[in-house]
């Protein structure tokens, strides 16, 4: 793993949270998008070299909706940048971690993503992110 790619924060109201983080960080989000496969709308902020992703559920069955219902707003995951997501998934499986998806999937911000089950990572949902190179 290269570095922390971003911190993901689950929010109930993306517009209100965007306004709050704009005041907090002094910058507007650099990107907003919907990831239908995950049932979320996201916005990304830069704070120095660090990124923060805000996540709002688009339907009641999305993982973010379930998280909000169970735990409320707050840090949802920590994402790590990797060069080869398939190799990293295999390495982590070999180390005994539970990878939640068999193959990487397209995530927000032009990334391939995979997740590790929080039961094996001290209760923290870990996301692996590999940048998708333009063809």
Image: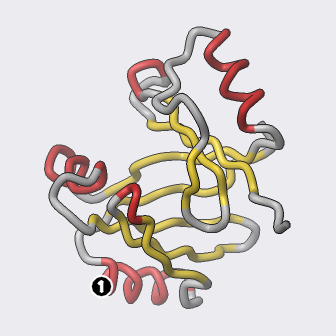
Q: Is residue 9 left or right of residue 56?
A: right
Up-down: is 121 above or below 10? above
Up-down: is 86 above or below 112? above
Quarter of the figure with residue 11: bottom left
Quarter of the figure with residue 65: bottom left
Which residue occupies the foreground of this view, 22 or 61?
Answer: 61
Q: Residue at coordinates 39% horizontally, 29% vertically from top-left?
A: 123
Q: Which residue is mark 1?
A: 16
Q: Is residue 105 left or right of residue 135?
A: left
Q: Residue at coordinates 55% horizontally, 84% vertically from top-left?
A: 29
Coordinates of residue 115 in the picture (x, y in percent) = 52, 37
Up-down: is 83 above or below 123? below
- The quarter of the picture where the N terminus appears is top right
Please say which color scheme the image uses.
secondary structure
Coordinates of residue 120 in the picture (x, y in percent) = 46, 18
Sort mark 1 into few (<14), some (14-19) or many (20+) by Cα contacts within 10 Å. few
Coordinates of residue 38 in the picture (x, y in percent) = 38, 55
Of helix, strand and loop, which one carries label 1? helix
């Amino acid at each position: 793993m290269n570095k922390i790619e971003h911190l993901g924060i689950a929010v109930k109201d993306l517009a209100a949270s965007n306004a709050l983080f704009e005041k907090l960080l002094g910058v507007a989000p650099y990107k907003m998008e919907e990831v239908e496969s995950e049932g979320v709308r996201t916005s990304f902020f830069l704070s120095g070299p660090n990124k923060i992703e805000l996540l709002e559920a688009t339907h009641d069955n999305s993982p973010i909706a379930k998280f909000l219902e169970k735990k409320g707003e707050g840090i949802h995951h920590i994402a790590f940048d990797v060069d080869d997501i398939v190799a990293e998934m295999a390495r982590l499986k070999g180390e005994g971690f539970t990878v939640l998806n068999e193959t990487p999937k397209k995530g927000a911000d032009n990334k391939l993503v995979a997740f590790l089950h929080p039961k094996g990572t001290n209760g923290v949902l870990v996301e692996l992110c590999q940048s998708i190179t333009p063809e």
